[in-house]
Amino acid sequence: MRRKIVVGNWKMNNTIAESETLAAEVVAALGENFSGCEVGIAPTFLALEAAGRIIEGSEVQLVAQNCHYENDGAFTGEVSARMLFAAGCSSVIIGHSERRQYFGETNATVNLRTKKALSEGLNVILCVGETLEQRESGVTDAIISSQVREGLDGISDISSIVIAYEPVWAIGTGKTASSAQAEEVHLHIRTLVTELYGDDAAQGLRIQYGGSVKPSNAAELFAMPNIDGGLIGGASLNAADFAAIITAASL
Ligand code: 13P
């Protein structure tokens, strides 16, 4: 049985002080001895350390939103995996569609960043997902396959990787993929990973869904056999909503 994982991707929201408040609210909402599922929060780089102090000793893990593929050097505006590990992060989100869409991230750079993060001791949440245009022209499976294959190229052990399926058309739009639509792609990913890594690795792999997950639709999504939790954007900025989604993943 795979343990579900719910991570709040705060994106470019919250000052340091606001991040501290929200982190404290999440810890309080989960209560003591929470063990329902794995939980993480991903504040901005700037607020990682402060939020990390707040969640210390709780079950909530510290997650970064991106990392570079070199340890250090002349890469203005970037943060390395080595720095994130030292700052207390256990995981990093790589290849989010907003990185691909607005910041030129490609399957090749996603692969480099993933390899570096793993080698520095971080777990990776590797994001994949098709645009509306790709879905409507019937190439969803092909796009997802190339994102997974190229993102994982040269990686022999996927035990520290979670894949997040986030259809671009469902992110921040209020349009959630139906649980059947999401399950179809999750199954496609697991089947591909079975081909690439064998049955044991594929059955152990957790595949999160992301895209307008809310308290009202979380339970139905998480009930699907190949949906192992969620990567939550907007709803993770409200502790009560985020906690309700976590509860839905803990059933
Ligand atoms: P929303 O939940 O706001 O649609 O965002 C999803 C997402 O991009 C999480 O990484």
Image (cartoon, grey):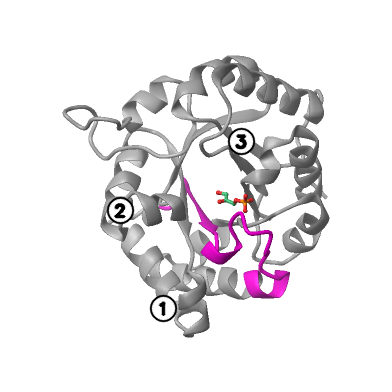
| Residue 31 horizontal side relative to residue 98, left or right | right
Q: Amino acid at mark 3?
A: Gly
Specify start and end residues of the magenta stretch as a single range: 158-182
Q: Residues within 10 Å of mark 1 (few under 14, many from 20)?
A: few
Camera-nearest label, 2 or 3? 2
Q: Amino acid at mark 2?
A: Gly
Real-space Cα separation, disc 1 to disc 3, in angstroms: 30 Å
Q: Residues within 10 Å of mark 3 (few under 14, many from 20)?
A: many
Percent x, y of residue 47: 51, 22
Which quarter of the rendered picture does the N terminus lie within? bottom right
- Residue 197 to residue 37: above or below: below
Real-space Cα separation, disc 2 to disc 1, in angstroms: 20 Å
The disc label shown at residue 40, or none: 3
Q: Check whether the beta carbons of the residues at disc 2 and disc 3 lie within 8 A of each other.
A: no
Camera-nearest label, 2 or 1? 2
Q: Which of the 4 image quarters holds residue 243?
A: top right
Q: Earlier in the sequence, mark 2 or mark 3?
A: 3
Q: Residue at x 39, y 20 (%)?
A: 86
Percent x, y of residue 74: 16, 29
Q: Secondary structure at mark 3?
A: strand
- Outermost residue on the bottom side: it is 138
Q: Earlier in the sequence, mark 1 or mark 3?
A: 3
Q: Secondary structure at mark 2?
A: loop
Percent x, y of residue 134: 46, 77
The residue at label 1 has a CB less than 8 Å from ligand 1: no
The disc label shown at residue 104, or none: 2
The disc label shown at residue 142, or none: 1
